[in-house]
Image (tube, rainbow, N blue to C red):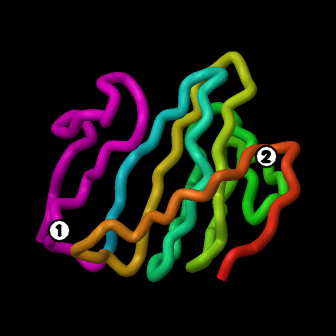
């Protein structure tokens, strides 16, 4: 069994960014992410994991393989292995979501991609 509370964990950047609620004893990585107004998270993909997001508060532009998806509270988005995703909060309120990466890996699986909205997206293998 693994029981924890969100308040027992810290965001990567004190008030925002990701914070993991799992400790490595489960088969997934799970946590909360907060993206502040006018903040973007660089485009990246995961080679051997899928990553999903359940939006709790606010809204955020998410570009998946160059296609815009606007996530709003209550929406659930799954990015499959190899699908690049870029978050950009263009609103005036924080965006908060639960994220889940599966399966859990003992190494960093993120590959960052030099891409921003407005550029042509070329799918990499």
Identity of the residue furthest to the front in this view: 114
Q: Nearer the viewer, residue 4 or 25?
A: 25
Q: Which residue is at 42% across, 36% downward?
A: 17
* Residue 96 screen position, x and y as percent: 53, 37
Question: Which image quarter: residue 24?
Answer: bottom left
Count of numbered circles in the view: 2
Q: Is residue 66 left or right of residue 35?
A: right
Residue 2 sits inside the magenta stretch: yes
Q: Nearer the viewer, residue 77 or 114?
A: 114
Q: Earlier in the sequence, mark 1 or mark 2?
A: 1
Q: Which residue is at 37% across, 80% downward?
A: 103
Mark 1 surroundings within 10 Å by alpha-carbon count, few (fewer than 14), some (14 through 19), many (20 or more): some
Q: Is residue 70 left or right of residue 15?
A: right
Q: Label 2: which residue?
A: 70
Q: Label 1: which residue?
A: 24
* Residue 84 screen position, x and y as percent: 65, 64
Asked if residue 59 is positioned above or below residue 23 in the image, the reply reads above
Q: Nearer the viewer, residue 124 or 81?
A: 124
Mark 2 surroundings within 10 Å by alpha-carbon count, few (fewer than 14), some (14 through 19), many (20 or more): few
Secondary structure at badge 2 equals: strand
**Stretch of the chain drawn in magenta:** 1-27
Q: Which residue is at 46% across, 56% downward?
A: 99
Q: Is residue 4 left or right of residue 15?
A: left
Secondary structure at badge 1 equals: loop
Predominant secondary structure, magenta span: loop
How many angstroms separate mark 1 from mark 2 (CA)? 31 Å
Q: Which residue is at 65% across, 32% downward?
A: 58
Q: Is residue 18 left or right of residue 53?
A: left
Asked if residue 101 is positioned above or below residue 90 in the image, the reply reads below
Residue 11 sits inside the magenta stretch: yes
Q: Quadrant of the C terminus?
A: bottom right
């Amino acid at each position: 069994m693994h029981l924890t509370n969100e308040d027992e964990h810290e965001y990567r950047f004190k008030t925002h960014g990701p914070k993991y609620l799992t400790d490595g004893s489960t088969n997934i990585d799970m946590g909360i992410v907060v993206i502040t107004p006018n903040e973007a998270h660089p485009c990246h993909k995961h080679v051997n994991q899928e990553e999903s997001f359940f939006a709790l508060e606010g809204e955020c532009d998410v570009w998946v393989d160059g296609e815009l998806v606007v996530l709003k509270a209550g929406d659930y988005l799954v990015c499959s292995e190899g699908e690049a995703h870029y978050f950009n909060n263009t609103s005036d309120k924080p965006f908060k979501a639960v994220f889940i990466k599966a399966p859990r890996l003992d190494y960093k699986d993120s590959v960052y991609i030099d891409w921003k909205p407005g550029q042509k997206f070329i799918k990499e293998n």
